[in-house]
Image (cartoon, coloured by chain):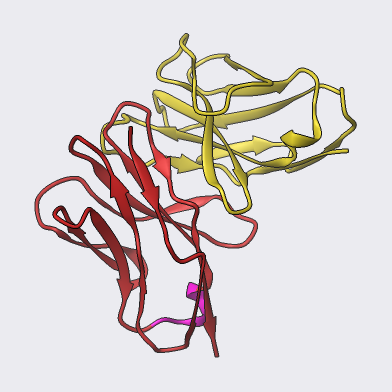
Chain colours: A yellow, B red
Amino acid sequence: NAGVTQTPKFQVLKTGQSMTLQCAQDMNHNSMYWYRQDPGMGLRLIYYSASEGTTDKGEVPNGYNVSRLNKREFSLRLESAAPSQTSVYFCASVRAPLGDEQFFGPGTRLTVL
Amino acid sequence: AQSVTQLDSQVPVFEEAPVELRCNYSSSVSVYLFWYVQYPNQGLQLLLKYLSGSTLVKGINGFEAEFNKSQTSFHLRKPSVHISDTAEYFCAVTTGANNLFFGTGTRLTVIP
């Protein structure tokens, strides 16, 4: 099992450009999440998908959109990147949210110039 | 709403010495508690979790944590640290259903 995979690992964008971060899990998990990690702020939830076909906003959704393409894949899109979106982005998945651990991908380091 | 406080942003400790990383939480309802570890340039891995039952929880790599409901704490301990324990440690809390809240992290540096 590969677990949770993310692409790309690194990305540099110019302000106003768009891009999609890809995430896939092979553990047959129901719920998937996108977090951003900034120095001194821990991880903050951007969006989540409780099950295939549903998505909901987390703590910091502004400037992002998501798509739960199928049970395996959950993508995060930046339509018009801003320097404030410079961060490390993590995707995670869990079989069942109540008490199960979340499994994390290796992260995508994004820099917006 | 829930929140997590990790008071120590950095903890240096000598190799083979004991360490305690502090975590306090606030919630008006019952919670589940987690400690995750992040090694450099990697994602997070679960160290241990408290769901219910015994308040002393043992995890991987010799770590343990104690849930104290009256003090709303879930401190992480290890009796003897190794160089390989150098990493960032995150405490997290949830009441279930997609609302996992993380603390700001504690960077543990083990000094040879």
**For residue B51, which quarter of the picture?**
top left
B59 sits to left or right of B85: left
A48 sits to left or right of A38: left
Q: Residue at x 42, y 62 (%)?
A: B7
Q: Specify the farthest residue to the top.
A: A53
How many badges with numbers are in the image?
0
- Can residue A101 be seen here? The reply is yes
- In front: A13, or A32? A13
Above or below residue B22? Residue A50 is: above
How far from the left and from the top, in percent, is residue B75? 29, 64
**For residue B56, which quarter of the picture?**
bottom left
Q: Residue at x 63, y 22 (%)?
A: A75
Main secondary structure type of the part rendered in magenta: helix
Above or below residue B46? Residue A50 is: above
How far from the left and from the top, in percent, is residue A105? 56, 42
Q: Residue at x 39, y 23 (%)?
A: A30
Q: Residue at x 57, y 28 (%)?
A: A60
B108 sits to left or right of B72: right
Give the residues in magenta: B81-85
Q: Is the C terminus of chain A in the top left, top right, bottom left or bottom right quadrant?
A: top right
- Can residue A2 be seen here? The reply is no
How far from the left and from the top, in percent, is residue A107? 63, 44
Above or below residue B48? Residue A108 is: above
- In front: A20, or B94? B94
B51 in the magenta segment:
no
